[in-house]
Amino acid sequence: MDDRRAFLAVAASAVVGMLLLGRSQGASATRFAVNRTPAQWRQELGAERYAVLRDAATERPFSSPLLKEHRKGTFVCAGCAHALFSSATKFESGTGWPSFWKPLAHAVVTRADHKLLMERTEVLCARCGGHLGHVFEDGPKPTGLRYCMNGLALKFRPA
Ligand code: FE
């Protein structure tokens, strides 16, 4: 009887543990509307875009073809096609990364980034959580903001 009670106690705590684990994993997995496993993202995005969007890598400056994109249109997330920036807010920052002074409504979310011993604000796609770049407070009017984006995180849709 004691053995059976001990077994039940162990089994019950294991079940509680699995439930707690499942809940915490579920919470992080459902934070964004679009979710894929790392393997699925890697297959969809390819190595270069995956490194930026899912692993927060920074592309080499002056490497993006989108620096020379001056047509009217919309820059969308390369991960989930969410509309992120209008061409009307793109400007020449001289940094070597596509730069914008304002995102579209509900396009992005931000969070504090303490990597590289700097206090920076990371910018993520609001729909898939993909890493886009950072935002700085040295941009042009009217916002004074500079959304410094990785071209690999974006795709351009002409108007
Ligand atoms: Fe996205």
Image (cartoon, helix red, strand yellow):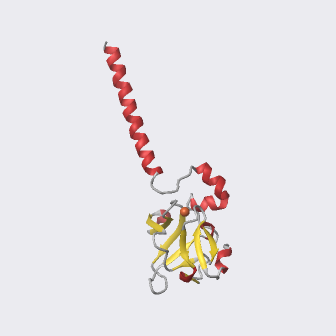
Residue closest to the far bottom? 141
Q: Is residue 27 left or right of residue 66?
A: left
**Which residue is at the front of the view, 143 or 134?**
143
Picture layout, residue 156 above or below residue 33: below
In which quadrant of this rendering is ligand 1 seen? bottom right
**Residue 62 appearing in the image:** no
Give coordinates of residue 147: x percent, y percent.
Answer: 51, 75
At x 59%, y 66%, the residue is 58
Compared to residue 141, the image places residue 151 above or below, namely above
Q: Kindly identify the residue that appears in the image at 49 percent across and 69 percent down.
A: 107
Picture quadrant of residue 111 = bottom left
Q: Residue at (40%, 30%) from the top-left corner?
A: 14
Residue at the extreme front: 159
Residue 125 visible at all:
yes
Judge from the rendering whether residue 136 lies leftward or rightward of residue 154; answer left or right: left
57, above or below 91, in the image: above
Q: Residue 72 location in percent, x, y?
A: 61, 82
Give the quadrant of the C terminus: bottom right
The residue furthest top is 1
Location of residue 99 by image quarter: bottom right
Horizontal side of 22 relative to 128 (left or right) equals: left
Nearer to the camera, 113 or 12 = 12
Q: Residue at x 44, y 46 (%)?
A: 26
- Report the number of numbered marks: 0
Residue 6 in the figure: left or right of residue 60 = left
- Residue 63 is situated, as x and y percent measured from the top left of the image, at 67, 73
Image quadrant in which the N terminus is located: top left
